[in-house]
């Protein structure tokens, strides 16, 4: 038996596991402390009732002789694929139902999709980046090259002038920076991918947060994208499905990847739960308004954070098109994390956990109740004022 030696190249802990380890250690030391979590990007609002009712209806249907659903189609039921097609149509993006594959979430699909590619491919990812992209490729031993996302390019790097890539990851709106590409900016990436004969893995998990009309919600809004891109999307943030689990992958029919993915899924996946697919259908049909309301709730929270940051003169990106606000603290991110936890009992995510360019930056999320965000900002304001005054004395400035 030989273990996968690539695991040795992974960092010891997945970023969010390390965050919760430190928070746990703090809570053990101070059991009565009121810690506010603005760290992990998980939803906090309850599922809309209409979606829960779809769950109940589907479960009851399954308890009848004619309503029982066994193994479903590997690529999802037509009713949900068609609902996804209509969701795109509302944004003037035309997709064929056979281009939509239902699965159990974007993270799973983004990792599993790599089965379709040789390990001898060069992967291009922005830095900072959602760590799952890197980990999945490290596990299968692919070469990774980074594109710098930084203050200078507004954390929206254009394609590099030089450098070869086979698989390109783009996450927009971005986790962790909250920055979102416009259609014109994405066109540069599409042209780059076509030129390199590369594939774009476009992670649109946060598309429902887009507020700025200039930002794209789908890579397929871009001319040429159907010849080089695959889109990964999720009900997680759009409809509060992080614990329900459902997402979709859109693969143009003309791409060989479409047939390959169906073949892969038929070998390794037995279909997404019927009940969950009925819930997802409700999230898009009949329940969409409620899902939008929940997203709007998080957007209002983001505005509260941005308002506080504006008052304090903090440098940040994001918040407008994403539940993430990415701000500069000027010291090592993990030092800031520990200090903020100790002084104000607020949990954030250290930017350095997303890549070297994240050093000195911090991700704060709007996923919490408005009350808690309010309270967090009440604590943050005096904390930051004191931090700025003492920063130079207490820390090594970057
Ligand atoms: N993609 C990005 C950029 C994310 O931030 C997340 C979750 O935080 C996911 C994908 C995971 O999505 P899902 O819950 O559908 O697996």
Image (cartoon, grey):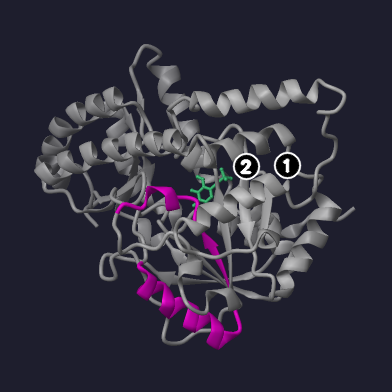
Q: Residues within 10 Å of mark 1 (few under 14, many from 20)?
A: many
Quarter-wise, where is residue 122 in the image?
Answer: bottom right
Q: Name, please, the residue furthest toward the top.
A: 32
Tag 2 residue: 246
Is residue 75 rendered to the left or right of residue 16?
A: right
Q: Position of residue 51 (x, y in %)?
A: 55, 29
Residue at screen point 23% across, 24% down: 375
Q: Is residue 228 visible?
A: no
Badge 2 element: loop
**Is the distance from the Cβ of mark 2 to the nearest ligand 1 atom less than 8 Å?**
yes
Relative to the observer, which residue lies in front, 117 or 53?
53
Q: Pick the residue in front: 313 or 324.
A: 324
**Distance in Å between CA atoms under marks 1 and 2:** 8 Å
**Image x and y of residue 365, in percent:** 35, 40
Q: Earlier in the sequence, mark 1 or mark 2?
A: 2
Q: Are marks 1 and 2 in contact (CB under 8 Å)?
A: yes
* Mark 1 residue element: loop
Residue 344 vs 310, above or below: the answer is above
Q: What residue does disc 1 label?
A: 272
Q: Is residue 330 above or below residue 254?
A: above
Q: Position of residue 228 (x, y in %)?
A: 59, 76
Q: Nearest the camera: 101 or 109?
A: 101
Q: Position of residue 52 (x, y in %)?
A: 57, 24
Height in image: 311 above or below 171? above
Q: Residue at x 53, y 38 (%)?
A: 283
Residue in the image at 34% along x and 26% along y:
369
Q: Residues within 10 Å of mark 2 (few under 14, many from 20)?
A: many
- Give the extent of the magenta segment: 182-211
Residue 162 visible in rendering: yes
Determine if the C-beta at disc 1 is less than 8 A from ligand 1: no
Q: Which mark is residue 258?
A: none
Membership of 31 in magenta stretch: no
């Amino acid at each position: 038996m030989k273990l996968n030696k690539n695991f040795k190249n992974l960092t010891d802990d997945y970023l969010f596991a390390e965050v919760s380890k430190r928070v746990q250690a703090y809570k053990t030391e101070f059991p009565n402390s009121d810690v506010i979590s603005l760290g992990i990007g998980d939803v906090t609002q309850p599922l809309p009732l209409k979606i829960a009712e779809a769950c109940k209806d589907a479960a009851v249907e399954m308890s009848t002789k004619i309503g029982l659903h066994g193994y479903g189609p590997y690529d999802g039921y037509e009713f949900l694929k068609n609902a996804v097609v209509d969701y795109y149509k509302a944004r003037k993006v035309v997709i064929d139902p056979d281009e939509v594959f239902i699965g159990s979430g974007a993270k799973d699909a983004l990792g599993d999709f790599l089965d379709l590619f040789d390990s001898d491919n060069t992967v291009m990812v922005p830095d900072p980046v959602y760590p799952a992209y890197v980990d999945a490729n490290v596990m299968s031993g692919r070469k990774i090259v980074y594109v710098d996302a930084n203050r200078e390019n507004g954390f929206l790097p254009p394609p590099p002038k030089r450098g070869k890539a086979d698989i390109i990851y783009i996450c927009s709106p971005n986790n962790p920076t909250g920055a979102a590409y416009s259609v014109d900016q994405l066109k540069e990436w599409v042209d780059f991918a076509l030129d390199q004969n590369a594939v774009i893995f476009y992670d649109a998990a946060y598309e429902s947060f887009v507020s700025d009309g200039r930002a794209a919600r789908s890579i397929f809004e871009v001319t040429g994208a159907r010849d080089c891109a695959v889109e990964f999307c999720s009900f997680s943030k759009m409809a509060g499905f992080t614990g329900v689990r459902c997402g979709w992958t859109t693969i143009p029919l003309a791409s060989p990847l479409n047939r390959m993915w169906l073949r892969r899924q038929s070998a390794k996946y037995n279909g997404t739960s019927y009940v969950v697919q009925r819930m997802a259908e409700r999230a898009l049909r009949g329940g969409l308004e409620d899902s939008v309301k929940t997203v709007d709730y998080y957007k209002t929270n983001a505005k509260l954070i941005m308002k506080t940051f504006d008052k304090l003169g903090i440098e940040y990106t994001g918040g407008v098109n994403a539940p993430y606000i990415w701000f500069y603290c000027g010291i090592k991110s993990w030092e800031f994390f520990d200090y903020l936890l100790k002084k104000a009992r607020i949990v954030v995510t250290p930017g350095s956990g997303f890549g070297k360019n994240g050093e000195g930056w911090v991700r704060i999320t709007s996923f919490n109740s408005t009350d808690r965000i309010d309270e967090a900002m009440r604590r943050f304001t005096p904390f930051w004022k004191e931090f700025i005054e003492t920063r130079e004395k207490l820390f090594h400035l970057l």
